[in-house]
Amino acid sequence: MAVAEKGVAERRTAIFNSGKNGHVSPGAFPTPQQVAQAAREITVPSPRQVIAANAERMKNSSEFEQSMVLNMGPQHPSTHGVLRLVVELEGEEVVQLAPDIGFLHTGIEKNMEAKTYQQALVMTERTDYLGPMINNLVYALAVEKLLDCPIPPRAQVGRVLLSELTRMNSYLVWLGTHALDLAAMSVFLYCFREREMLLDIFELVSGARMHTSYIRPGGLAWDFPKEFKETVQLFLNIFPSRIDEYEALLTDNPIWKERTVGVGKLNAVDAIALGASGANLRATGVPYDVRKLFPYSGYENYDFRLITGTEGDTYERYLVRIAEMRESVKIAQQALDNLPDGPYATSDRKIWPPPKEEITYSMESLIHHFKLWTEGFKPPKGDAYVGVESGRGELGCYIVSDGSNKPYRVHFRGPSFINLQALPHMAKGQVIGDLIAMLASLDPVLGEVDR
């Protein structure tokens, strides 16, 4: 186990005060030359390479008498899904490891090619099932970019509000399971207590607790119910004090610090070389947040801090996410206060069906309705990429259109898949007992890893 370092309070204060309202300081990013050099030096072995290297070492050297290969998963409860880690150990020290993925492969990207653009939406939330609204959003934005479709203000603000509620939902699952992995069961129960409130909001809005399909190309599926603002406000009033409870149990807890401080360090150069994003990247000191640097859905109009760390260890990944939950509350409150009246979807009848009452007296509206639900819309030929900030990092959606009513190709940049590459680099030289903490701090969702 790692020994708790001095200066934890100072680090926590620095993280809380980081960001300067999101103004990125020049020189905060490593140079391209540094990143290129790190990318050449970092290796991510395959499971077969780990097993072969261990066998070769044991055959040729008596120094590796305590060497062994351990299969962790794919049924291990601490892998947060069906993930297999092939770990080579020397005693308790990790010599190298390789993630073995694909056990949850569903072929979502290929299946989307056989669906219309509207039908394909429901598959997006089956990747990162802890962030359904954000997955809906990135797909909708990419399709809207192809269509050059304007979105009304009520839908834009509503999307931001729902995205931040989704981020809090995702972080609560991360914090609860991370704490449970390190034997802090009370935190797990408290996190899921608050998560129930969020799932109730999702159900109120969309009718579903997880697979919502609420944010759609063109706007929102339907308008918010009357009690929506009151229900969300109740949660936003309660949640900051609940975050204080989590911190009271963990942040200065000597056992928690013993298990996380100095564990799984990742520096900024290596993090960028490995393609890491989200809190895992920001904890290394790199001020990269898609909401700030490449704002979408009007995020440039919201006041929030870009949180960064310095050390890039498991403890700082925890601190960064805790601070970001507080920022999500701020953004959600601003969105709720400024939620305008008006339409919740585009008025372009070639993209969004007309209201039911309009169909009763307009033949043109009836034709639009019939064509949309039987054939779907047809974006012009071309391609579009959109990146958003999900609970795990930069979630990207790339769509190629051939001019038909079905996408020619859809590809998702899954941050869980890319962040998982950092685990072999982080774990080298650490003890096996800390591997659980490192994996949990990366916060992968295996549905997004395997797709």
Image (cartoon, grey):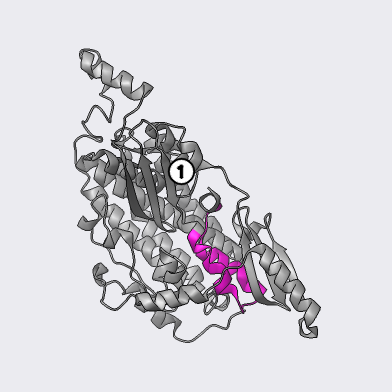
Q: Is residue 313 magenta?
A: no
Q: Is residue 430 magenta?
A: yes
- Residue 350 position, x and y percent, is 25, 27
Relative to 46, 4 lies left or right = left
Relative to 232, 114 lies left or right = right
* Residue 364 in view: yes
Q: Amino acid at mark 1?
A: Glu
Please identify the quadrant where the N terminus is shown: bottom right
Q: Residue at x 67, y 67 (%)?
A: 49
- Please, what secondary structure does the residue beneath circle 1 have? loop
Nearer to us in this view, 164 or 58 = 58
List the residue tagged with mark 1. Answer: 125
Task: Identify the magenta region.
Answer: 418-446
Relative to 132, 151 lies left or right = left
Q: Main secondary structure of the magenta part?
A: helix
* Residue 235 in view: no
